[in-house]
């Protein structure tokens, strides 16, 4: 094992009990991960804390045997760092709060917020990207209703007219889409709101 060994092999070696493999992974990716974190939080001490938390989470996941990124270690590592940055902003109450009678749509209110700083924008961009990926996994009829309602801001009456179904059917498809999105959020372990 040396510094040219692939990430996938190093991960496998570490899971098998070789601590040196993790050391090589940390050294290999330290600069990129730290610089990414620093570019978002702009604080050296905080960046170091988040960097350490990132690798603690990596170690725990690998030791639990729940890692299954199929050789895509660096994107997985960066996603952990990204999520920890978002968690930091949320915990420090620097996230916008939106109240809504309909809790399912709080996330969509956030996406439309106009008064954002860079931190909030980072979080909103990630949420938007995650949400679009999840919507793409929905059945075609549900995806169509969600897209029209949330991304085109159409009323259920307009959706019903455009899809040649009743308003109740359009509402039903939206309801099932929300149920499916909740399931997908859990399956993909994605954080969409505070």
Image: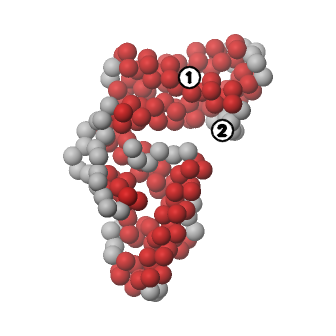
| Residue 41 picture quarter | top left
**Residue 100 placement, left or right of 11:** left
Q: Nearer the viewer, residue 122 or 32?
A: 122
Q: CA distance from mark 1 to mark 2?
A: 16 Å
Quadrant, the N terminus:
top right
Please tell me whether mark 2 sits on a helix, a strand or a loop: loop
Residue 47: x and y in percent read 40, 20
Q: Nearer the viewer, residue 53 or 42?
A: 53
| Residue 22 picture quarter | top right
Q: Is residue 144 visible?
A: no
Residue 18: x and y in percent read 75, 16
In this view, 162 is above or below 93: below
User: What residue is disc 2 on?
Assistant: 69
For marks 1 and 2, the one nearer the N-term is 1
| Residue at the left extreme, as displayed | 115
Q: Nearer the viewer, residue 193 or 73?
A: 193
**Residue 139 placement, left or right of 116:** right
In this view, 104 is above or below 162: above
Residue 116: x and y in percent read 25, 43
Quadrant, the C terminus:
top left
Nearer mark to the viewer, of 1 and 2: 1
Q: Residues within 10 Å of mark 1 (few under 14, many from 20)?
A: some
Residue at image coords 38%, 20%: 46
Residue 48: x and y in percent read 43, 17
| Residue 155 picture quarter | bottom left
Residue at image coords 29%, 51%: 98
Q: Residues within 10 Å of mark 2 (few under 14, many from 20)?
A: few
Q: Which mark is residue 55?
A: 1
Q: Is residue 186 visible?
A: yes
């Amino acid at each position: 094992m040396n510094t040219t060994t692939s990430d996938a092999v190093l991960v496998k070696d570490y899971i098998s009990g070789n601590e040196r493999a993790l050391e090589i992974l940390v050294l290999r990716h330290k600069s990129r991960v730290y610089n990414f974190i620093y570019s978002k939080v702009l604080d050296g001490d905080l960046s170091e804390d988040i960097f350490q938390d990132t690798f603690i989470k990596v170690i725990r996941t690998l030791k639990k045997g729940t890692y299954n990124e199929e050789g895509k270690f660096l994107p997985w590592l960066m996603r952990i760092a990204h999520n920890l940055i978002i968690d930091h902003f949320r915990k420090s109450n620097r996230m916008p709060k939106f109240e809504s009678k309909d809790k399912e749509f709080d996330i969509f209110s956030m996406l439309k917020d106009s008064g954002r700083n860079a931190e909030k924008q980072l979080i909103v961009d990630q949420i938007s990207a995650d949400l679009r990926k999840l919507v793409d996994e929905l059945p075609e009829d549900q995806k169509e209703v969600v897209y029209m309602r949330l991304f085109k801001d159409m009323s259920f009456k307009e959706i019903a007219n455009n899809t040649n179904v009743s308003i109740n059917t359009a509402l039903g498809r939206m309801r099932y889409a929300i149920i499916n999105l909740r399931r997908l959020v859990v399956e993909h372990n994605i954080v969409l709101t505070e």
